[in-house]
Amino acid sequence: MRTVQKAVLGGFTKGQKKEDKKMSTPHNAAEKGQFAKVCLMPGDPLRAKFIAENFLEEAQLVTSVRGMNGYTGKYKGRPVSVMGHGMGMPSVGIYSYELFAFYDVEKIIRIGSAGGMDPRLDLGDIVIAQGACTDSNYGAQYDLPGTFAPIADFGMLSTAVGLAEKQGCNFLVGNVVSSDTFYSAHPERSNRWMDMGVLCAEMECAALYMNAAYLKKKALGLLTISDLIGDSERAMTAEERQTKFRDMMTIALETAVG
């Protein structure tokens, strides 16, 4: 396990005055330039820590506001950042917007868990999110005269598909649904998404894709199936979600530097 170095975050360096301390956003303590042009974003900040410690060289903690850790290091000699984005579209909406708009990040790859809907999927399989349906009202802010279809960046998507094939992973490419609810009052509604060929349910890709479209950036969602909708007895534990997504992590890192 590699050692993650800590940047100066919470306090002040010797001789530094309070008014000299800079925080670019209310949710991110990194200084401009401390994030790479490409950032991997898991929901869980502990998963970000795991990636920094196990995959990145010279990893440095650059922000830890609200416990949402962000790191920058090198993968195969190329600068790469990794930062948690929390749960749900409001959370990923804030963190990804700030990275895109204020830290000059050009590409974000979400690496998360999802509930499998398609019968071809099993625990540990990967879904590459070509598009993201949603039951959220996130897109209302754009005041569009219709319904926007959030999609991934094709270049990153095609690269990820090639890498998944090369690694021999079990994976599917297609539509996912980004839901505002984890504990739904009407779980039977999942069947309606399944009828439309939606592969799995998660909670963030649609907002990430919308932010990328609005800010003229690039985004991709890679998801590992951690549970199967309709089969409550088969699911990964919280610990497994933190550490057993190595195939997805490797595909994301190789896509990031590809």
Image (cartoon, grey):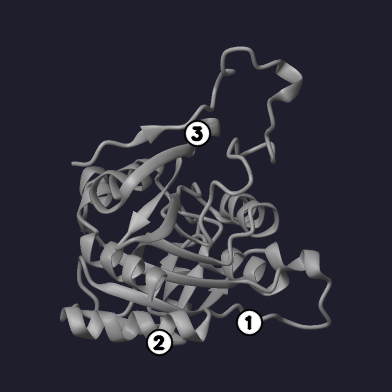
The residue carrying mark 3 is: 64
Up-down relation of residue 61 to residue 162 (above or below): above
Which residue: 69% across, 52% down? 102
State the image coordinates of residue 15 (x, y, percent, origin top left).
Answer: 63, 12
Identity, as a three-letter code, of the amino acid under mark 3: Ser
- The answer to whether marks 3 and 2 mark residues whose Cβ atoms lie closer than 8 Å is no
- For label 1, the SS is loop
State the image coordinates of residue 25 (x, y, percent, origin top left).
Answer: 69, 40
Residue 169: quarter of image: bottom left
Q: Nearer the viewer, mark 2 or mark 1?
A: 2
- For label 3, the SS is loop
Upstream in sequence: badge 3 or badge 1:
3
Upstream in sequence: badge 3 or badge 2:
3
Nearer-the-camera pick, 246 or 71: 71
Identity, as a three-letter code, of the amino acid under mark 1: Ala
Question: Visible in this render: residue 220?
Answer: yes
State the image coordinates of residue 31 (x, y, percent, origin top left).
Answer: 62, 40
The residue carrying mark 1 is: 149
Most distant residue in the top direction: 15
Residue 27: quarter of image: top right
Identity, as a three-letter code, of the amino acid under mark 2: Ser
Question: Visible in this render: residue 229?
Answer: no
The circle on residue 158 is: 2
110 relative position to 28: left or right: left
